[in-house]
């Protein structure tokens, strides 16, 4: 509990609040369901008694939490902190609670130890620097049963003490799941007794940084070799982490990837791939009976270590490249009456589900497990937008919502030029907070939304300090989305509480992003662009249409006056994947012009590039065009996000302006937001 003591000490250093309403808006996170203010306040002191009426295990946990806090209690006194398990009127969730605060006593009642634990977190957040809590009543319960954080420990490995530190923080903000992405190509991170090569070899690689390894030799290494970089959790480490989390009412969800993202396994045990060659395959051979023997043996040891109801089995991004030509896969498909490789993947997932179900557990998979038919009892984790979650709900399956557009914490959280390198586009705190997991769903569908989760993939996040920088404060938005009623949520009020929470996190030893110094949105996006072409008709060449997924509003997008922000996913940048950009703008009459320009962005990781050549031409009749500028650009790979304007300035007169932009040898995407004509 020592680390928890440091953290809670920092949390108690809050400004004095004059009433419960100001307390709610300035201190408690996530926001409670209902607060009633009364006169007076309760002040902790040496005359405060602690009474806990609960089962032995809950009493042990709650006593430990309070012993780790700066609060002190006496055996006798005129004031009391009373924690008790019992019925709570108006509360349906076992994690809900009721707190009644008078000048003489604080009484917290909940249906379970978890509810009392969360009541204690609310009390600790509510104490001002004088040790006082405003009088009143707080009735509170979570919106969703599942409120989680996913941490990728494969791309870069983080030790057990660091994992415990994150459990301390997320549990304080009433999150109850920590999903560990334990296996992937970059390294296997959990000891499996039956398969020692997974940790003797597959847990180690030739280079410490994922990016150098992934874009380099992609070789694995023997444990103890001079070039070996990586690590793994022993089974004793896992037991320690699981116990530590359980003492804070956090359930650890293990993820074992299948059938894809398994290069490390298939190099250590190549007989499980379709070709039986190391360094050749990413997907397990779905036709090989040895694959199922291996996966069942691994999952047996995993389930002995993790008591969680759910086991995450991955299921995402399977290339299935060798399955159509693999004799074993084709034989399996014929025997099982499967018509395509998606159904073969579904066969694998359903077979694993039956095994996991036979052990009294359930599976979670990324939304690709929908392909080819969903396993009967599976829960879907929807990451490719919200469609997977909706499809699961429509078929009567639980869904955990974690769409990349709102919940991927590996994205830039502020202006990219002010931030360390990130994998994804701009994802500020306000964008995360705006997400509503049940928006647009009918009541029948919404009841299958089991919860929400923030995901941190660490390809470009190699250190513990950077992990915390990317998690906090955005995970606080996920916490409030998962707990609080959307009807009472408000970003302006939340952001004030988040700034205070960040200060406390930083004082408690967490490397949280300093929200008070947020740079904010790209300045071009702050106001409409007024120019000669605004509102004018744009005609797109048939050979170079915009992509429907990134249409930015359609045919009028490039002259609507709306400029894009820091990300191509903000619905303001128009995307082109085939043929580049080839458009003609009709100014409706011949006009004197002095400049034509358009901004492009580059972010090489998702295959977004600058153009290699831009040509600008003008015409009076829309048929015969005169070239006024040709701009050539050497497109080179970099690791960040950049913006560049491609344009012409001078003197010309024309009614029609033709703007073309061609891709370089990298091909990929071009994104532009507005063609500005002055």
Image: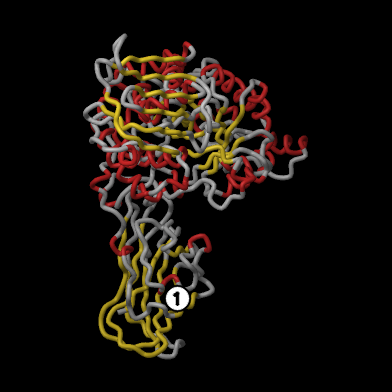
At x 47% / y 43%, what residue is drawn? 485
Can residue 229 be seen here?
Answer: no
Q: How many marks?
A: 1
Q: Position of residue 505 (x, y in %)?
A: 28, 33
At x 48% / y 67%, what residue is drawn? 553
- Residue 624's image quarter? bottom left
At x 39% / y 42%, what residue is drawn? 477
Q: Position of residue 370 (x, y in %)?
A: 63, 42
Can residue 171 be seen here?
Answer: yes
219 or 570, nearer to the observer? 570
Left or right of 370 in this view: 269: left
Q: Position of residue 145 (x, y in %)?
A: 53, 33
30 or 417, nearer to the observer? 30
- Residue 238's image quarter? top left
Q: Which residue is mark 1?
A: 583
The quadrant of the picture occupied by the N terminus is top left
Left or right of 188 in this view: 126: left
The quadrant of the picture occupied by the C terminus is bottom left
Q: Position of residue 372 (x, y in %)?
A: 67, 43
Is 222 rendered above or below residue 75?
below
């Amino acid at each position: 509990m020592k680390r928890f003591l440091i953290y809670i000490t920092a949390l108690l250093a809050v400004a004095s609040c004059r009433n419960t309403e100001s307390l709610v808006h300035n201190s408690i996170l996530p926001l409670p369901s209902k607060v009633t203010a009364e006169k007076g306040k309760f002040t902790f002191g040496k005359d405060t008694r602690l009474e806990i009426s609960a089962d032995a295990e809950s009493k042990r946990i709650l006593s430990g939490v309070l012993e780790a806090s700066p609060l002190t209690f006496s055996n006798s006194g005129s004031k009391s902190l009373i924690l008790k398990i019992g019925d709570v009127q108006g509360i349906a969730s076992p994690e809900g609670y009721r707190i009644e605060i008078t000048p003489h006593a604080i009484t917290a009642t909940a249906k379970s130890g978890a509810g009392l634990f969360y009541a204690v977190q609310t009390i600790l957040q509510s104490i001002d620097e004088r040790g006082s809590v405003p009088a009143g009543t707080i009735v509170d319960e979570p919106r969703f049963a599942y409120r989680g954080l996913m941490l990728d420990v494969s791309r870069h490995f983080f030790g057990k003490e660091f994992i415990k530190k994150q459990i301390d923080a997320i549990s304080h903000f009433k999150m109850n799941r920590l999903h560990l992405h334990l296996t992937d190509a970059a390294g296997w991170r959990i000891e499996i007794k039956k398969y020692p090569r997974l940790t003797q070899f597959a847990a180690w690689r030739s280079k410490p940084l994922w990016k150098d390894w992934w874009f380099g030799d992609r070789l694995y290494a023997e444990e103890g070799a001079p070039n070996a970089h990586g690590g793994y959790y022993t089974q004793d480490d896992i037991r320690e982490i699981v116990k530590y989390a359980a003492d804070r009412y956090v359930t650890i969800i293990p993820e074992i990837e299948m059938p894809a993202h398994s290069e490390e396994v298939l190099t250590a045990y190549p007989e499980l791939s379709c070709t039986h060659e190391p360094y050749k395959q990413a997907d397990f051979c779905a036709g090989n009976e040895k694959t199922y023997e291996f996966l069942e043996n691994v999952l047996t040891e995993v389930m002995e270590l993790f008591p969680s109801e759910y086991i995450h089995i991955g299921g995402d991004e399977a290339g299935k490249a060798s399955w159509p030509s693999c004799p074993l896969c084709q034989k399996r498909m014929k025997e099982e009456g499967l018509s395509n490789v998606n159904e073969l993947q579904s066969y694998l997932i359903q077979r694993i589900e039956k095994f996991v179900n036979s052990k009294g557990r359930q599976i979670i998979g990324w939304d690709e497990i929908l392909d080819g038919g969903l396993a009967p009892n599976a829960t879907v984790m929807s990451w490719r937008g919200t469609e997977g979650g909706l499809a699961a709900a429509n078929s009567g399956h639980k869904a955990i919502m974690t769409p990349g557009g709102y919940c991927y914490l590996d994205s830039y959280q502020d202006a990219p030029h002010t931030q360390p390198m990130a994998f994804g586009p701009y994802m500020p705190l306000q964008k995360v907070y705006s997400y509503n997991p049940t928006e647009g769903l009918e009541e029948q569908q919404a009841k299958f939304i089991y919860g929400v989760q923030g995901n941190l993939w660490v390809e470009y996040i190699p250190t513990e300090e950077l992990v915390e920088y990317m998690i906090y404060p955005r995970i606080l938005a996920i916490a409030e989305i998962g707990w609080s009623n959307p009807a009472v949520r408000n970003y302006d009020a939340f952001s004030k509480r988040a700034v205070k929470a960040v200060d406390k996190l930083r004082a408690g030893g967490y490397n949280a992003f300093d929200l008070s110094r947020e740079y904010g949105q790209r300045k071009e996006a702050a106001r409409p662009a007024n120019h000669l072409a605004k509102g004018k008709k744009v005609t797109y060449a048939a050979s170079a249409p915009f992509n429907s997924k990134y249409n930015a509003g359609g045919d009028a997008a490039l002259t609507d006056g709306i400029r894009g922000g820091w990300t191509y996913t903000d619905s303001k940048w128009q995307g082109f994947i085939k043929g580049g950009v080839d458009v003609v703008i009709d100014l409706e009459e011949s006009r004197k012009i002095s400049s034509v320009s358009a901004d492009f962005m580059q972010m090489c990781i998702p295959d977004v590039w600058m153009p290699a050549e831009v040509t600008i031409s003008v015409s009076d009749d829309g048929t015969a065009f005169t070239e006024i500028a040709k701009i050539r650009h050497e497109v080179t790979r970099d690791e960040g996000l950049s913006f560049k304007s491609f344009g012409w300035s001078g003197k010309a007169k024309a009614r029609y302006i033709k703007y073309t932009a061609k891709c370089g040898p990298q091909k990929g995407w071009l994104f532009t937001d507005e063609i500005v004509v002055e």
